[in-house]
Image: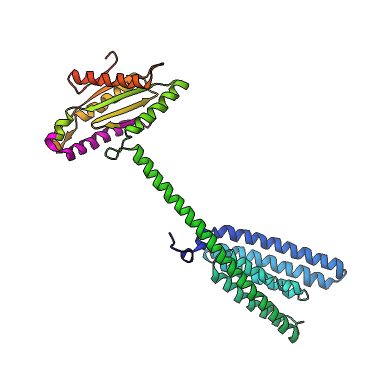
């Protein structure tokens, strides 16, 4: 993130292609307006003057149309130089109008337009480029025009150059103001993004168990409340499985808590890897895990926990000298009218029965 507004390159934040297309569209509009203005002038002051039609209407309109068409080709060919091409085109555009309508003093001030166009690209060097280019084209236009006297040339040139210099400082002020506004806007957006990322990590810490990567105890109760509420409104099946590692205290006592954490992490991964995206695995606490199955029948839920139990019992752990461990599971399904406490107590009671019957097994109602 830029440390101050001068280090922020605003030009990188704009869509240069979009601005260029808009300016080019305005060029066609300017062509139409110049043609319309010349036609109005003809009917008001030059009616019947064939020379005026040719020299002040048709010929400049043709040149301007060719200029815009050439510009469109150049923009596609030299894409990185879009800003320079547009500024050069605007200067030539205004010079053509000035040359063929030299009697219009107001039109000579139109060179300011190319200065304003350069501002759209948010770079001071483009404004300087537009200023120098305008002065160059003004001098050339006045020198080659046949009806320009030395006095008119000097007076008009001084006035227009002074006008352009004034417009340069105005454009420079606009750029500096835009730089300040956009910098603070950019800074606020970045701050909000950083805050959002921090909130995401904070939310993850609140919901996810750091060791296993499963949902934690708090998330279990939040999700179970939501699922039960939804099941009351729109009935669908919910199964709760509580899993407990057999003789885990012995592992901690013999191998240490660090090894115990490795085993917990590995068991959590096995559980997570063998569930569908519609199921929710939790580390309920200590060596105890829980799984919420949604929208599956009892036979399928039983098959899934048995698969997990079998994989765990057949997994050897080098940290335990190649020994395997087992888990006991209690499985209960949600029935209409059952509350959260009853659902959990029933699953926990079946887990107790699994331990009592010799461990390494799944127990549920009528099984």
Q: Is residue 171 visible?
A: yes
Relative to residue 211, is residue 34 depicted above or below?
A: below
Q: Residue 24, position in %: x, y?
A: 64, 61
Relative to residue 243, is residue 111 depicted above or below?
A: below
Query: Which residue is located at x 78 percent, y 76 percent?
Result: 103
Residue extending farthest right? 48
The stretch of residues the image draws in magenta is 253-282
Q: Residue 362, position in %: x, y?
A: 25, 21
**Front residue of 21 and 115:** 115
Q: Say left or right for 87 vs 340.
A: right
Q: Is residue 274 magenta?
A: yes
Q: Is residue 233 magenta?
A: no
Q: Quadrant of the N terminus?
A: bottom left
Query: Which residue is located at x 61 percent, y 63 percent?
Result: 72
Relative to residue 242, is residue 144 depicted above or below?
A: below
Q: Quadrant of residue 306?
A: top left
Q: Say left or right for 290 vs 6.
A: left
Q: Residue 349, position in %: x, y?
A: 26, 19
Q: Quadrant of residue 246?
A: top left
Q: Quadrant of the C terminus?
A: top left
Give the total number of marks visible in the rendering: 0
Q: Is residue 46 visible?
A: no
Overall secondary structure of the magenta stretch? helix
Q: Residue 67, position in %: x, y?
A: 66, 67
């Amino acid at each position: 993130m830029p440390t101050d507004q001068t280090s922020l390159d605003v030009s990188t934040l704009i869509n240069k292609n979009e601005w260029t297309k808009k300016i080019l569209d305005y060029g066609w509009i300017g062509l139409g307006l110049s043609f319309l203005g010349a036609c109005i002038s003809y009917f008001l002051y030059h009616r019947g003057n064939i020379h005026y039609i040719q020299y002040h209407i048709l010929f400049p309109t043709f040149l301007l149309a060719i200029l815009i068409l050439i510009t469109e080709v150049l923009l596609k060919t030299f894409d990185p130089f879009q800003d320079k091409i547009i500024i050069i085109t605007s200067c030539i555009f205004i010079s053509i109008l000035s040359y063929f309508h030299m009697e219009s003093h107001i039109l000579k001030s139109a060179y300011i337009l190319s200065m304003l166009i350069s501002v759209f690209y948010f770079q001071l060097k483009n404004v300087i480029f537009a200023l120098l280019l305008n002065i160059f084209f003004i001098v050339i236009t006045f020198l080659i025009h046949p009806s320009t006297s030395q006095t008119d040339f000097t007076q008009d040139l001084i006035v227009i150059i002074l006008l352009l210099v004034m417009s340069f400082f105005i454009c420079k002020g606009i750029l500096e103001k835009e730089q300040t506004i956009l910098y603070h806007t950019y800074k606020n957006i970045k701050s909000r993004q950083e805050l959002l990322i921090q909130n995401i990590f904070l939310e993850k810490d609140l919901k996810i168990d750091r060791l296993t990567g499963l949902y934690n105890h708090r998330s279990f109760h939040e999700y179970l409340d939501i699922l039960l509420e939804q099941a009351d409104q729109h009935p669908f099946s919910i199964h709760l499985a509580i899993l407990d590692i057999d003789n885990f205290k012995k592992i901690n006592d013999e191998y240490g808590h660090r090894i115990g954490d490795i085993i917990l992490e590995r068991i959590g991964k096995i559980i997570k890897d063998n569930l569908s995206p519609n199921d929710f695995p939790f580390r309920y606490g200590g060596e105890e895990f829980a799984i919420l199955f949604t929208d599956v029948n009892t036979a399928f839920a039983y098959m899934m926990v048995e698969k997990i139990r079998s994989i765990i019992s057949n997994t050897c752990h080098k940290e335990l000298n190649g020994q395997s461990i087992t888990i006991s599971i209690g499985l209960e399904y949600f029935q209409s009218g059952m509350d959260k406490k009853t659902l959990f107590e029933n699953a926990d009671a079946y887990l107790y029965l699994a331990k009592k019957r010799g461990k390494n097994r799944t127990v549920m109602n009528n099984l």
